[in-house]
Image (spheres, grey):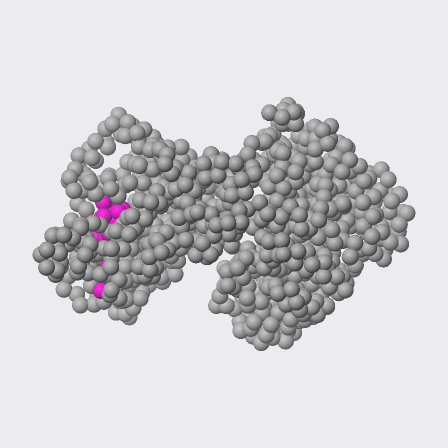
Amino acid sequence: MTDLEAALRRAVRGEVGFDVTSRALTTMDASNYRRVPLGVVAPRDADDVAAVLEVCRERGVPVVARGGGTSIAGQATGTGVVVDFTRHMNRLVSLDPEARTAVVQPGLVLDRLQDAAAPHGLRFGPDPSTHSRCTLGGMIGNNSCGSHSVAWGTTADGVRELSVLTARGERLRLGREWSGAPDGLRELVDGDLARLRTGFPDLPRRISGYALDALLPEKGADVARSFCGSEGTLGVLTEAVVRLVESPRARALAVLGYVDEAGAAEAAAGLLPLGPLTVEGMAVDLVPSTEGLPRGGAWLFAETGGDTEAEARALAEAVVRAADVVDALVVTDPAGQRALWRVREDASGTATRMPDGSEAWPGWEDCAVPPARLGGYLRDFRRLLTAHALRGTPYGHFGDGCIHVRIDFDLLTADGVARFRRFSEELADVVVAHGGSLSGEHGDGQARAELLPRMYGEETVALFGRAKALWDPDDLLNPGMLVRPAPLDTNLRFAVLPRGPVDVEFGYPSDGGDFSAAVRRCVGVAKCRTTSVSGSGVMCPSFRATGEEEHSTRGRARLLHEMLAGELVTDGWRSPEVRDALDLCLSCKGCRSDCPVGVDMATYKAEFLHHHYAGRRRPAAHYAMGWLPVWLRWAARARVAPVVNALASVRPLTAVAKRLGGIARERELPRLARETFSRWWRGREASSGGGALVVLWPDTFTEHLSPSVGRAAVRVLEAAGLRVVLPPTLRGPAVVGDGTSRSAAPLLSLLTARRGRVCCGLTYVSTGQLDRARAVLRRTLDLMTPVLETSAPVVVLEPSCAAALRTDLPELLHDDPRAARLAARVLTFAEALERHAPGWAPPAVDRPVTGQTHCHQHAVLGDTADRRLREAAGLTGELSGGCCGLAGNFGFEDGHYEVSAACAEDQLLPAVREAPDGAVVLADGFSCRTQLGQLAGVRGRHLAEVLAEGLEDGPGKR
């Protein structure tokens, strides 16, 4: 233990982390930069903060204050001690609806403040797109803005008083009329009034530099406002009094279509006199799909408010009439508005990939110019991109003249980094020529501070340095930011990554087969750190259960980045730190769809486990549950299901079995079916249906644990006029078949053929046994070859197995063209009915539903067909999001029970408890049904079972 660590542990009541994991998690924010800290402290209160400052001051160690870590310019990273306010100093201290103020701690997430203020008809005005995870302290440090700044301004406009600790331990209460100003600050301002009155651009989004002009007497000498945007370089915030604004009772969203972004940009300023709440812009190259948007190549999102829906709509329609548009749409439905806003809010992540899949990066993320000059600035910006052979996708706060953009800089080579510098210098000059600010929202950090003399001139920047010296004479707080900045092309986070390919098992098709590129996908926007999910969202259940950064998708990606770097995490694939962080990943695949940049931590986890345990003994659960298909097939062949079930009822025996198998003692072992699905199939009367042929996949769970689902699916599919068969069970010439191993081949071929069963390999993949998974999947492809020679779809009832076939199969066997062909054939139960029995109408069940969309279905398969099928059957209501928490082997593994149960309590169990009487509990996944049974005593049912029961009244025809 170092002297610094020991001193901090003695002085601080909060957590002190100098271990590899704590440091690795804070090497980066959402920027291009990386710095390795000495340690991390999570203070419990202001006294802890003071103690940290004292210990570090005595030793000359820098201190960096950190909130949600979503800063885009590098200002939330440092080489000294990082102070993490999110763990303890995250409370809403008080809220006064009459005074319209709130007292907050710096680690409070913005959405928690909004949730508390909403019942009073109030809100905090600024709302960055990261509102679900950014903190008030970080917003004050960066002077954040968000989409509603045309109505309610920046964070500085919403601040009344700030409690601050200086690096030398002085406690200040900052406010107007010089309240809380450090000694010498007033004299500094009085000595340079002319410069402060003329040297700062007059535009709504000037965030760059220190806001020293807020200290002018005619502006109320507002020390708190001047402190906003100082990026933790002047003092450490411990508490804030913020202003709240009245939130409109109703809102409407006018979506205005234009030919291109320049047309949208030029129109934006003209809408401001109508008093919209937002004027946001984006172009078609940022939108994954234009479905639901009016015609055009670019759009403005102009939100309006009113006391009633009619009033809000009338204002929106007035905006449409005033706008010169190609097409327009007015949306008053809250769900429709949320869906449209989600496209805009995810832009900070989706913009990190160009349409062809190549990478794009921040660096010039938020320049701002006067709104009336935005169109001209954008044209000049595009010309500069072309001159440097770069590409970017501008979007952002057009009404405030603020543009966000990610650019496809090559930050991996010396030539690319040199071009990054040249472009940055030239763009800074373009911004200044248009009367703009280098930063319009996210701060200067390391990305732009070096270029501040181009905007302000050397003398004003020198004045910034003198102000910094008054607040922090020892240069202890976030050095290298704003004043005496580090060069913008140093400390790049890519520099430490391997330049050659990393030997991996999966194909990573979206990343050119490069595992480093896959890990680089995480840019730190931290959508995975949200504490609640909206709609059907899933990501990230383990973070919501523990609240720990290392259990977020971002945290795990950071550890994998450091593993590849080899500087902090030094033992590569054998790293216990990475293993422990991945241990609580449920492999729910939620990040694959919910992460704006498509990080796929389930695949990364499987990859890591494969390498981590190569040539080593694995945890017992990997053998017990990873090889579950083998054990269940053996039990079925020996016909010992009744014996196994009886033994499972004997507690001493099950206790021993669980201990040997690495299974949580709290778990009940699932009962084996007395008759497997395939055995039932062989004993049934063959259907004489002449409809379209579909191949029903007998997954392990349907086959051995819940054959009732398979029987129900067969009944429904055949009622819909489809001809159901099972996959062949012989390799070699076999019919597309019935699962009985019949063959039309000569007797010799039949005798030499090898018997087998198809399997998606899910349990092997999820436990990282990728060699075994590959062997199983190749056997499956051999068996399915006759099917692939037909046009028959493959219907998979278990969502996790369907997802494995759609994604894991082609990504693991990327060298076998049959894998992609089989993946393309996979359909869910609802998709099969919709595509191959379009004239069939399901029975009218007419009941409410509750339950949860399977996380793999949400992330990989989609549930649109399921929604339509439920609606056609009269099954009303929405299923919850999140993850059930059992997640295949995860919830059964020893040590995972508490997190598994917490995940279920996040969405699933409350939804079931709050369901109306008579509601059908839908759960298509075996894990979901098991979790419901074990934690809630509720029987969940597959949609096929519900429809099969409804067939008593007979199907109809559309």
Q: In screen coordinates, is 807 left or right of 307? A: left
Q: Is residue 893 magenta?
A: no
* Vertical placement of residue 837 versus 449, above or below: below
Quick check: is 698 in the magenta stretch?
Answer: yes
In the orientation shown, which residue stands out farthest toward the left? Answer: 747
Which quadrant, please, contains the N terminus?
top right
- Residue at x 70%, y 70% (from the top left corner): 376
Task: Between residue 273 and residue 524, name the one nearer to us.
Answer: 524
- Front-most of 214 and 762? 762
- Whether residue 148 is visible, yes or no, is no
Image point (80%, 47%), residue name: 464
Q: Is residue 165 left or right of residue 363?
A: right
Q: Position of residue 94 (x, y in %)?
A: 64, 40
Please indicate, yes or no, whether residue 484 appears anywhere in the rendered image.
yes
Residue 931 % position (x, y): 34, 41
**Quadrant of image for the C terminus:** bottom left
- Horizontal and vertical percent position of residue 514: 47, 52
| Residue located 35% across and 40% down the image | 889
**Residue 354 figure quarter:** bottom right
Specify whether 469 is left or right of 492. Answer: right
The magenta-colored residue range is 693-711
Residue drawn at x 19%, y 60% as measured from the top left:
736
The number of numbered discs placed on residues in the rendered structure image is: 0
Outermost residue on the right side: it is 191
- Residue 3 is situated, as x and y percent measured from the top left of the image, at 65, 25
Between 620 and 146, the one lying in front of the other is 620
